Image (spheres, grey):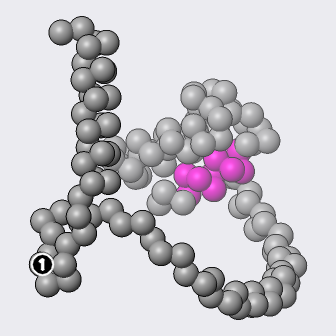
């Protein structure tokens, strides 16, 4: 059976259903129909429309509280690459393998993959991050 033939059959079935629904007698109030019958609504007088409630006043937002200045980072005890590496290695040994591995996460949070890439301006932040692990 082709698609067009199925469409024609379905269209004929829909027309037959519409005709059957229009010819169905309304049921008596005592007998409940098996399926609800479609009944045209009776025109009713429209209910009076109540006045809409007044709009509430717009919210007033307080300005945000001033932010306290960020705490200054502790001063790093190292000033060159060699003392930086010595500090990180001694911290790694003191923290142990499990916690010492988190030093890499501190480096990554500063945007570095290798300890040799850390610039002197990041020494204080690296020091604060490693100290926070202790």
In the depicted structure, whether residue 119 falls above or below residue 7? below
Residue 41 is one of the magenta-drawn residues: no
**Magenta span main SS:** helix
Image coordinates of residue 62 in percent, x first then y, are 85, 83
Name the foreground residue: 89 vs 5: 5
Within-10-Å neighbours for mark 1: few <14, some 14–19, many 20+? few
Q: Is residue 56 visible?
A: no
Q: Is residue 71 left or right of residue 28?
A: right
Mark 1 lies on a secondary structure that is loop
Q: Which residue shows up at 56% across the image and 58% down it? A: 131
Name the foreground residue: 62 vs 27: 27
In the depicted structure, whether residue 131 falls above or below residue 18? below
The residue to which callout 1 is attached is 31
Q: Which residue shows up at 82% across the image and 73% down it? A: 67
Give the residues drawn in magenta, as a range: 123-131
Image coordinates of residue 36 in percent, x first then y, are 24, 66
Q: Is residue 134 left or right of residue 30?
A: right
In the depicted structure, whether residue 69 falls above or below residue 130? below
């Amino acid at each position: 059976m082709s698609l067009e033939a199925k469409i024609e059959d379905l269209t004929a079935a829909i027309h037959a259903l519409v005709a059957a629904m229009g010819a169905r007698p309304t049921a008596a109030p005592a007998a409940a129909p098996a399926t609800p019958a479609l009944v045209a609504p009776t025109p009713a007088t429209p209910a009076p429309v109540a006045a809409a409630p007044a709009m509430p006043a717009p919210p007033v937002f307080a300005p945000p509280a001033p932010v306290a200045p960020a705490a200054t980072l502790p001063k790093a005890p190292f000033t060159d690459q060699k003392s930086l590496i010595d500090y990180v290695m001694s911290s790694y040994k003191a923290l142990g393998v499990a916690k010492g591995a988190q030093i890499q996460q501190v480096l990554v949070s500063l945007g570095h993959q290798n300890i040799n890439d850390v610039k002197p301006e990041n020494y204080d932040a690296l020091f604060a991050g490693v100290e926070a692990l202790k």
